[in-house]
Amino acid sequence: VAGYVGEEQLGKALEGCDVVIIPAGVPRKPGMTRDDLFNINAGIVKGLCSAIAKYCPSALVNMISNPVNSTVPIAAEVFKKAGTYDERKLFGVTTLDVVRAKTFYAGKAKVNVADVNVPVVGGHAGITILPLFSQATPKANLPEEDIKALTKRTQDGGTEVVEAKAGKGSATLSMAYAGAIFADACLKGLNGVPDVVECSFVQSTVTELPFFASKVRLGKNGVEEVLGLGPLSEYEKEGLESLKPELKSSIEKGIKFANQS
């Protein structure tokens, strides 16, 4: 492990990288929305992505900095301008939503969390987070009111932690765990391990939106395949329609920011 500090060592830090993980920026405090973070974190992300385009243009980029729904489109625009954009290599890390959905579901269904799988699609903030509990394995036929409560808790998980820490930070440990899982999956893909599938916020044609989180198959080029949504329950179909306008506006906000100045 080598450590680098500050703007002047950024090039050295990035040179020759295969995977770059970006958790930079300020965390949320109580009462702050992810949008309040926008201007600070968006500027940091824009600068880092310019450096990636220069020093390691073919690296896989794992975007953790919030709001992910806007920072991923910012990165894409920066890379497009630099002529280095490859949509297979840019990921919004939404693994924490999956970790939360799995944990809450396992608790309710009384099964071991290690055996649970729950796809989470959409985006990475509030109602844009859509856990597909109808596709959860192992199947536990939970009543509708439980599914609604689990969905809400998954969507509000970040806020719950911010409030519990009362101004002392946001979800750091669980995010580190989720970030490590996703980075590890990227490395497995690069190393040719077959059938590595994780949910991630990527450029997508799964819906009419330009970016969307769904299951993706990872490989030697990053995204090998963006997988479809599969069958949705009526409740999930409603959730999908109601998240689209909010996600669309966050994506557009990122694109607009990236193209200023």
Image (cartoon, rainbow, N blue to C red):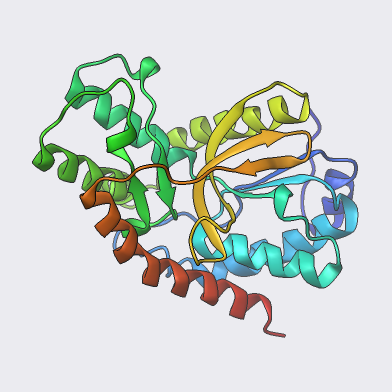
**Residue closer to the observer: 195 or 38:** 195
**Image side of residue 192 versus residue 101, left or right:** right
The count of marks equals 0
Residue 192's quadrant in the figure?
A: top right
Q: Is there any visible trace of residue 31 in the rendered image?
A: yes
Residue 122 percent location from the top left of the image:
43, 54
Residue at the bottom extreme of this rendering: 261
Residue 181 percent location from the top left of the image:
56, 29
Q: Is there any visible trace of residue 165 in the rendered image?
A: no
**Image side of residue 245 versus residue 52, left or right:** left
Q: Is residue 251 above or below residue 10?
A: below
Q: Is residue 251 above or below residue 14?
A: below
**Image side of residue 93 versus residue 58, left or right:** left
**Residue closer to the observer: 61 or 45:** 61
- Quadrant where the C terminus lies? bottom right
**Image side of residue 224 versus residue 234, left or right:** right
Residue 253 percent location from the top left of the image:
52, 76
Q: Residue at x 21, y 51 (%)?
A: 235
Q: Residue at x 71, y 49 (%)?
A: 88
Q: Residue at x 64, y 42 (%)?
A: 225
Q: Residue at x 48, y 60 (%)?
A: 207
- Quadrant where the N terminus lies? top right
Residue at the front extreme of this rendering: 231
Q: Is residue 173 above or below residue 94?
A: above
Residue 206 percent location from the top left of the image:
51, 55
